[in-house]
Image (spheres, helix red, strand yellow):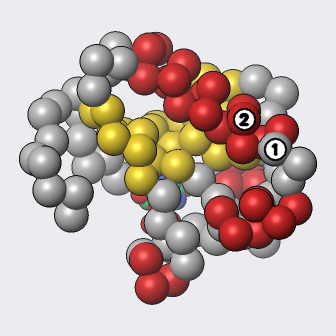
Amino acid sequence: MCIFCDIVEGKIPSTKVYEDEYVIAIRDLNPQAPVHDLVIPRKHFDNIVDMAQNDDGTYAAAVFDAIAEVAKVEGTDTGFRVINNCGADAGQSVMHVHFHVLGGRKFEEKII
Ligand code: DGP
């Protein structure tokens, strides 16, 4: 069972801000900034390593396009931050690869 597969399939409700053939983007349940969306490939990959090994580049390209679209749709395209937590030690809590798009405020120069 995977929460994000269920969201992709519409079994769990979410607020979608963007979708195409390969990815969806939804508002994060627990936002850390005025804009906090998650770009999620429709196909299940556990994390970036799984995606790098098993995607021919289609989903990776779609993720980048979607990130740019989300920033535009959310009105934060003059500055935003993209975060991926890869693996438990990095704080990944949902084991379906996803990319946090954060914006709507100025961030510090320090990344963490
Ligand atoms: P990470 O820690 O990188 O695996 O981030 C998981 C994010 O997913 C976290 O910020 C909260 C969010 N999240 C978890 N469950 C749900 C859900 O059911 N709906 C939505 N919209 N977000 C969720």
Seen at 76% across and 68% down, the residue is 50
Q: Is residue 2 visible?
A: no
* Contact? badges 1 and 2 (CB < 8 Å): yes
Query: Residue 107's x, y, as percent?
Result: 15, 42
Seen at 13% across and 48% down, the residue is 109
**6 with respect to 32 (left or right):** right
The image shows residue 6, relative to residue 34, as above or below, that is: below
The image shows residue 10, relative to residue 105, as above or below, that is: below
Which quadrant would residue 86 be assigned to in this image? bottom right
**96 with respect to 5 (left or right):** left
> Residue pushed farthest bottom?
89
User: How crowded is the residue under tag 2: few (<14 C-alpha within 10 Å), some, or many (20+)?
Assistant: few
Quadrant position of the C terminus in the picture: bottom left
- Amino acid of disc 2: Ala
Front position in the image: 87 or 2: 87
Circle 1 sits in a helix, a strand or a loop, which is it?
Answer: loop
Seen at 13% across and 34% down, the residue is 106
Circle 2 sits in a helix, a strand or a loop, which is it?
Answer: helix
> In the image, which disc is placed on residue 35?
none
- Amino acid of disc 1: Gly
**55 with respect to 97 (left or right):** right
Front position in the image: 3 or 98: 98
The residue that disc 1 covers is 57
Front position in the image: 16 or 64: 64
The residue that disc 2 covers is 61
Query: Residue 58's x, y, as percent?
Result: 83, 39
Query: Residue 52's x, y, as percent?
Result: 76, 61
Distance (Cα) linking label 1 and label 2: 6 Å
User: How crowded is the residue under tag 1: few (<14 C-alpha within 10 Å), some, or many (20+)?
Assistant: few
